[in-house]
Amino acid sequence: MNNYKTQSEAIKVNGKIAGIVRGDLLDIRKHERHLLYTPPAVAIGLPVLEAAERMGVIDVRISIIETGQQYQTTLEHFRAKSFPVRRGGFEDQLGCVLSEFTASMSIDSQMLKAGESRYRKATRPRGHNTEALPMPRQLLFRF
């Protein structure tokens, strides 16, 4: 049984918080852009998993920051269904497809309208030609 109300402890990799252990739960928050696309999966660094195992973690929960979507599974199941991931500039990782997780929505994200994000999207992403795309305000005042 999960005991989430106990003291939390951060797991750090290269000086950055990679996850927080709350009782027997490893809680990891990720942006959507950090998910693997084909197949849809999430990758966790081996140092994070090893530290979590030493701390007695049983469950892993991945929270997607933009949408509030949460994915949860046991650490044992994650390891059993995972595959190795090697990306340049990152430590060795294990990836697991999202279909192996139990999905749920956080209460905050359930209050959002369909297709809406918690965070404001950039109106003009970097790399786009600024002359070709008018700003939204310019569209209102065109004659």
Image: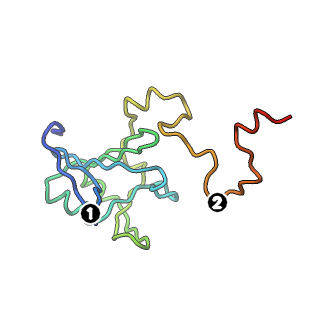
Number of other residues with Cα within 10 Å of mark 1, as a class: few under 14, some 14 to 19, many 20 or more? few
Q: Which quarter of the figure is the N terminus placed in?
A: top left
Q: Residue at x 76, y 33 (%)?
A: 140
Q: Which residue is mark 2?
A: 127
Q: Residue at x 36, y 46 (%)?
A: 101
Frontmost residue, 137 versus 45: 137
Q: Which residue is mark 1?
A: 15
Where's residue 6, x and y in %? Answer: 13, 40
Where's residue 65, x and y in %? Answer: 41, 44
Q: Residue at x 25, y 53 (%)?
A: 75
Where's residue 21, x and y in %? Answer: 20, 49
Taking 113 as reference, is 1 left or right? left
Q: Earlier in the sequence, mark 2 or mark 1?
A: 1
Q: Which quarter of the figure is the C terminus placed in?
A: top right
Frontmost residue, 6 versus 130: 130
Above or below, 106 against 83 in this view is above
Name which residue type carries label 2. Gly
Number of other residues with Cα within 10 Å of mark 2, as a class: few under 14, some 14 to 19, many 20 or more? few
Frontmost residue, 113 versus 73: 113
Taking 67 as reference, is 131 left or right? right
Q: Secondary structure at mark 2?
A: loop
Residue 1 seen in the current view: no
Instruction: Give the image quarter of residue 86.
Output: bottom left
Extreme-right residue of the structure:
143
The circle drawn on residue 135 is: none
Where's residue 128, x and y in %? Answer: 68, 57
- Rounded to the nearest angstrom, the CA distance separating label 2 from label 1 is 30 Å
